[in-house]
Every structure is written in C-alpha cells, then in structure tokens.
Image (cartoon, grey):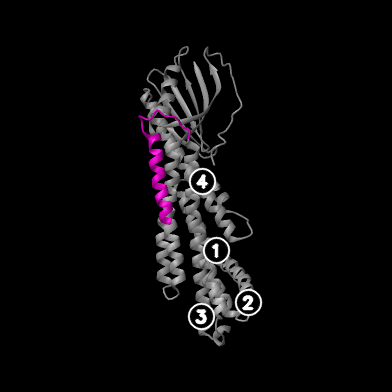
Amino acid sequence: MSHASQIDYQFISVECQNICELANEQLCKLDKILENIESGSSQLLNSQTDALKEEILKSKRKIEDNIKSLINKVKKYANSNYRGEYGDDYNLINEARNLKEMSENLINFKVAEMEALLNELMFERINSQRGKSSSKKSNLSSDIQKKIDNMEDVIMKQYVYLAWLNNPECSFEELGNIAEEMKINAEEKHYNSIEKQEIKEIKEELRKQKIEETTIEKIVNKQDTSAKERLQKIRSEANKEIIDEKIRYESVKIIVTAIRKRGFLINKDAIKIDRKNNQVNIVAQKPSGAKAEFKVYLDGKFVYKFDGYEGQACQDDIKPFMNDLKEIYGMKIEKETEIWSNPDKNSTMKYQTINYNKNRG
C-alpha cells in the first residue's frame, strides 16, 4: 500500500519562541546602539535627550517583560504531558508577532529619531560656532518657552527649539510647522546615511540562516519612495523569512525524531534541501523495505508519503507517528488533505485541492 497526505500545521511553542527569540536579539542591539550614541555625542546630550533615552529604555524593559511572560504561557504546548485544547493559540502567536513588531519599531523609529535629532543638534552647534545662527541676537520669549516646556513629545521639543534658533521672529504655531518639516528631512537624511550598512547587516543575517541568494536579493531590492519605507519593509520581510526558516528547521528535527521512533532509519544524506523548490526532503526506510518520504515547506505544511506496505499496514505507522507529533511535540494539525491512496497497488490516484495555511503571517 501507498498513502500520501498534506498536513497544514502549527507548532505553537516553536513559532512563539522563535519570534520572541528574534525580538530579544533586536532588543540586545539596542544597548549597543545607545552606547555608541552616547560615546559619539556626549557633548550634545541634555535633559531632553536623557528623557528620550529613558523613554526608549522603559519601552525596552516593558517589551522584555512581556516576552518573558509570553514564553511562560507557551511552555505548556511544549510539555509532553500537555493534553489541553489550543483555544488561545492564535492569540499567543499574534501576541508574539506584536512584540516583535514593537521591538522593530523601537529600533527602526524611536532610536532613529534620536540619532537624527542628535545630528541636527550637531549641525546647529557647528553653525553657532561659525556665527551662522540667527538667535545670537534674540532671546526666547517666555510665552514660547512655556509652550515648548508643555510639549509632551521630547523629540518635537528639541526640533521646535532648533526651528526658533533660525527663525526667532516666528510664532509658536509657525515654529511647529517648521519643526515638523525639519524632523522629516533630518530623519530621511539619517535613513539614507545608514541604508547601505543596514542592508549589508540584513543580508548577513539571512545568509546565516542559509536563505537562498535570489530570495535575499528579492527582499533587499525595494523601490519605495523613501529610505525609511524601504528599510522598514526590508527588515519586516527579512525577519519573517528568518522565523519561517527557523520553524522549518525545528519541524524537520521533530519529524525526523518522530519517524525514527517508528523504527525508520535516516542518515544525514537522506535529508536534503531543495533550493529550487524551497523545500526540505527527507527519506526514511525500514529494514523491511517500507519507506516514508517527506517534503517540508516554509508556509506551515509538509507532505508525507508512506510506501512499500501490504494492505492497510502503513496505518500502523502513520497513526502513531501523527499522534506523537500532536501529543508529544505539540503540533497542531490545521488540515489533513489526502493526496492519494493506493491500497491495492493499482496506481489509482486520488488528488485533492491543496489549501495552504492562511493563518500564518
């Protein structure tokens, strides 16, 4: 008998933990970035930039605490004794994705805002030293000073002050408009200045995960109108590719472990990556001649084919194998689609439409 099916699945714990791991890696970069900012701009730091730094660190600590809490929640799915329902699984995965997005935004936006602001403060200091600042002959009015002090956005406070330095005759409302434009231009200059290095680092991260070069080039070659938008999309797509590859890697390990428990033999040469079709192929065999083949994809599915059995004997391996995936390794089966079954070895084919897992983001 031969039997082939497609399995659409989710590993709740594996997916959540890999997403959280990536978010933590990004947060670890934050400390180094802030350290470099401080060492390179110590003379420009003031109470406002200190407040911004503390706001960033506070957000970082909150994300880290939420990541720890989430990892504890999903541990039950990785526990071999867990026999409960998966009612909140998508909520947990969405929570992990939100935390990853928050960590991305913290570095890609908040820290970038701070770096762009410090660049503007440096330019203003240079202009002031060269006598180009219009404010040398003017004093900030108490009314405008009070309005600046009452602003909650510490970044915009600094930009409004910078706007006043070169436009001391303007009203507070006019200064606000000038400051907004200054902020946009400063950030775009900053993103343009870091774009090449950021893309280089992203490529290295993708290559570390052995992502295909054509996929890497597709990710990094964006034609968006601004460097900020390009980097945002590149980072988001790169992180998704990295997470998907890590999940597949863990899935392959678990499938190999589970099929070996059924008495199948697998050597390293029987596990091959097919880059052309973007799949991992696994071939396992029993001394009796029974064979199991697997194709593991990136989008939360794998295909199995059991062959070389008499009658319905393959079900004696398939059912325990699938039960182990669910009950021991925490796999949630979204959908099982029979591709074909040939109990009498008549090559009678039974194909069904393949529905991909639409819940993966």
Instruction: Using a 10 Å C-alpha cutoff, classify the residue at mark 4 as few (fewer than 14 neighbours), some (14 to 19) or many (20 or more).
Output: some
Residue behind mark 4? 240
Q: Which residue is mark 1?
A: 191
Magenta stretch: dominant SS? helix
- Specify whether 170 is left or right of 360: right
Give the image location of residue 116, x and y in percent.
52, 68
Frontmost residue, 41 versus 339: 41
Image point (52%, 48%), residue name: 213
Task: Tell me where residue 176 sits by quadrant.
Answer: bottom right
Nearest to the observer: residue 253 or residue 39: 39
Magenta region: 60-87
Tell me the kind of residue under disc 4. Answer: Lys
- CA distance for labels 4 and 2: 46 Å
Q: What residue type is disc 2 on?
A: Ser
SS category of the residue bearing label 1? helix
Q: Which residue is mark 3?
A: 126
Callout 1, which amino acid? Tyr
Query: Which mark lies nearer to you, 3 or 2?
Result: 2
User: Which of the numbered marks, if any, corresponds to residue 171?
Assistant: 2
